[in-house]
Image (cartoon, coloured by chain):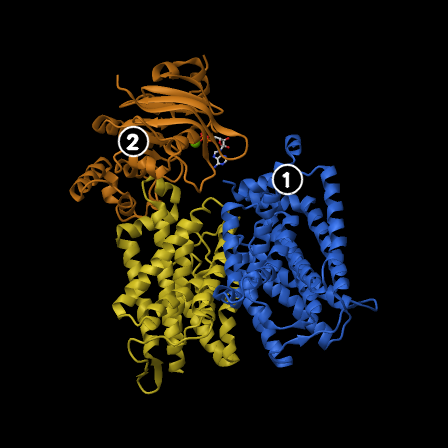
Chain colours: A yellow, B blue, C orange
Amino acid sequence: MLTLLLGALTLSAIYALVGFAWVLLRRTNGILNLATGAQLAIGAFIFNQFATSWQLPWPVVVLGTLATVAALGGVTHWVVFKKLSGQPEFALVVATLGLASALKGVSSLIWGTEARVMREPVPSQVVTFGDQATTTLYGLCGLGAAVLVFAAAHTFFKFSTVGIRMRAAAENPVLSAQGGIAVDWVYVLGWAMALTVAAIAGIMYAYQTALSFHGVEALGMRGLAPALIGGLTSVRGVIPGALIVGLAETFGTKVFGGSFQDVAAWIVILVVLLIRPQGLFGDKQVQRV
Amino acid sequence: MTTVRTLFNTATTMSEGGRGQALRRIAILALVCVLPLALRDYQLSLVTTALIAALGALALTLVTGFVGLVTAGNSALLALGAYGAAIGAVQLELPFLVVLVGSVLVGAVVGLLAGLPALRVSGIYLAIATLALHFILIFVFNEYQTRAVGSAGFFLPTASIGGLLIDNAIKWYAVLVVVVLATWRLVENLKRSKFGRAWMLIRDTPLAAASQGISLPAYKLAAFVVSSAIISMSGTFLAYFQQAVYIENFTLELAIQYIAMVIIGGMGSSGGAIAGACFVVLLPPMLSRAIALLPSDAVVAGFLQQNLGDFQLIIYGTLVVVFLVWRPDGLAGLGQRVAALRLPSRKGAR
Amino acid sequence: MNGPLLEVRSLTVSYGGDSVAVDGVDLVVREGEVCLVLGANGAGKTSLLRGIGGFASSEPGRVRGGRVTFAGADVTGLSPRAMARRGLVLVPEEAKVFASLTVDENLRAVPMSGGRAARRALVDEVTAMFPFIAERLSLPAGQLSGGERQLLGIARSLLLKPRLLMVDEASLGLSPIAVEMVFDMLRSVVASWGTTLLVVEQNVRAAQSISDNAYVLETGSVVLSGPAGDVLGSERVRQTYLGLEM
Ligand SMILES: Nc1ncnc2c1ncn2[C@@H]1O[C@H](COP(=O)(O)OP(=O)(O)OP(=O)(O)O)[C@@H](O)[C@H]1O
Ligand SMILES: [Mg+2]
């Protein structure tokens, strides 16, 4: 039982990271990014390229992944979404779908579709708490990563000038531009940060399971559930959202069998849409047009 | 730069002259009659597949083109029609037409159930709800298929209408031409009706629409329900035409392909949707043929041929983005441009 | 008399479609002067200021024709950010502050130029002008009173060291006392910094006292312009805006 709860917790940590990526982009850039799943997978594959295929030293792997992913974020904004600014919202959503398709093609072309095992910095092992509760080392790493990311994000948005400007641009991009803020760079940063966190989530998940485009992409899409529970724009709301989804998935799989993993989050989404589409923990205001 | 908004405005106000319309009808009729004579069976089957896709694309034009909503549920709704056909034809042994009507009804009901909660809020929630619909339906059908027949999927009997078996390429072609033309007509009529005008008002100026007393959720829902019914019907056609139903066919990428048809064809243009469907369906075989023309020992040719599926994904995805950025009016808009260049007199008359 | 700082020639602004919100407006603001723009609701005052200060590419508004020259350079159609960096700063009509940010964060969000010490000094100088700011630093700006929000908006724009400050309806929804406060503020900015002002104001009485020149807009065009005293004293303005019968 305790092991199960621990499993739900480590899973929630991953969901919190994925949900963060959804929310950040929705809030800062105003985009519902349906390419999140594909981007999660791409991030993990880039990491794997540095780590496993090229066998580079770990610091280089981390920096290289960061730089590549951030650059991808910049390209995404300048090449696609800047050109679409001023278009109605649905055009942006459609563009993210196009992006998802293209990214999937690129990934499959470069890395194929079969599952891979990633090079590990430390051997994976089982950690035991007390008498029976067990989890894996990489599960704990994921938990640590989530705590770290949320703490860093909190500090960044609350105390750093750039973070404050990002919040300003998220609230009112026109007023920000009139106040001299480089809104386009805020958007680039939004993409870069979302893609980085997505990559972290994808990597952590791949270490706990295996690296396959399909698996990681599906996880990325399911991460919409914690984001929706939090109201799509509330970073803080993602945490309870992730816990709900993590518990639902863990216990759902226990009761209904392994394949239930694929739908638990989506059922949660349908339920949330039915009872409180604006999210359970989000800000109160909903746009009704 | 043409924005989606200005494009919509012109598309809404533009009306074709009566003479041009008649000419177009004759041209379409002629094309429809000539195709089966000119093409071999295999090619005709491809055209038929494109026509089935055109049904879905027309339906999607209704929601995405007219109302400005995104739905990711196209693949799931196709699966709904296809698995409906499998259950109806194989398990219940119902006749083709009954199954067809059933799939229309089921499609409408599922559309209603998925759209109802989402459309109470704003438009993008439909994208979320349909995404959930996709994963849940595919899961359910997968479980059902595994239990009922295993991973090979269902095999369907030959379709028949009133005792007449539809058992060759020409017959399928004829049936689908009629269905597509009827659906096209329906979509065009809807566009001109009170509903169509309300939809486009909702899409262009939601506030104005709301202030005129148009109930946004109800009208959005109506569009989504009609479109779901049509897509489900096209899924049934697809199942009977291929005489096989298996889950691997119904991916999220397929849903994106349908969106690509609408975007490439030109949002809000039903003729464009058909053109887009033909383009998307016929591109892979054409690419295949083009690659076959390369010298066969070329490494490139082998590489391209092997990864055709990946290139397809890349091409559709890129085209969606490129058309959105560069030509939101799609092929339909390009066509009009060309026509306007060729016939400057008509341009003046406008 | 100083040379023109801002020169607007036959400026046309439209929000898509065929109709134009600003229709060939000519306007000149000299260095150091206070220029007032008057007009009924929907006359195009806001659109004029937005047309001068630039639209973001995400907005429907566009400058369709004409020329805006600022400090000798052609700045027509530049982005709002580019304008702000050149010293042409707009305090917009609605939402002048970021409601979800605290007062302190509203000030910190402004990208100021100059070294750390200079920035510090400027912040101190501006906060000294607006005593309420120091008391409310950690309050979300959305919880300020309307007048305080207007003032905070002006304070934010002052941190950009504007050469020309455009204020759209500084007195929007304010009590007479608050209006008094805002205009006192503007007067002291002009006096101590020599900032040039271009203000849109419905409250003619309040604006009267500080304005040098005035323009009257009707349906997107200038129908009357000249020294503020003459314009405001004219029969037309007295009847329409001051509600006085002759
Ligand atoms: N965002 C917009 N989209 C479309 N039309 C607009 C927009 N903003 C303003 N307009 C139109 O432009 C015209 C001028 O409006 P503007 O806001 O410039 O007037 P104003 O003089 O500032 O009025 P007010 O005193 O009410 O603030 C109006 O007819 C208005 O309908
Ligand atoms: Mg105004």
Q: Foreground residue, A127 or A72? A: A72
Residue furthest out toward the right? B163
Question: Mark 2 vs ligand 2: CB under 8 Å?
Answer: no
Toward the left, the furthest residue is: C117
Q: Quadrant of residue B245?
A: bottom right
Quadrant into which the N terminus of chain A falls = bottom left
The residue located at (52%, 71%) in the rendering is A263
Quick check: B154 left or right of A85? right
- Quadrant of residue A280 in the image? bottom left
**B50 relative position to C240: left or right:** right
Say whether residue A280 is visible: no
- Image quadrant where residue B60 sits: bottom right
Residue B259: percent from the left, percent from the top?
Answer: 57, 56
Position of residue A64 relative to residue A247, above or below, is: above
Q: Position of residue C130 (x, y in %)?
A: 24, 37
> Is C29 on the left or on the right of B65, as rendered?
left
Q: Nearer the viewer, mark 1 or mark 2?
A: 1
Q: Residues within 10 Å of mark 2 (few under 14, many from 20)?
A: some
- Secondary structure under badge 2? helix
Q: Secondary structure at mark 1?
A: helix
| Residue at numbered disc 1 | B339
Give the CA separation, mark 1 to mark 2.
Answer: 63 Å
Ligand 2: image quarter: top left
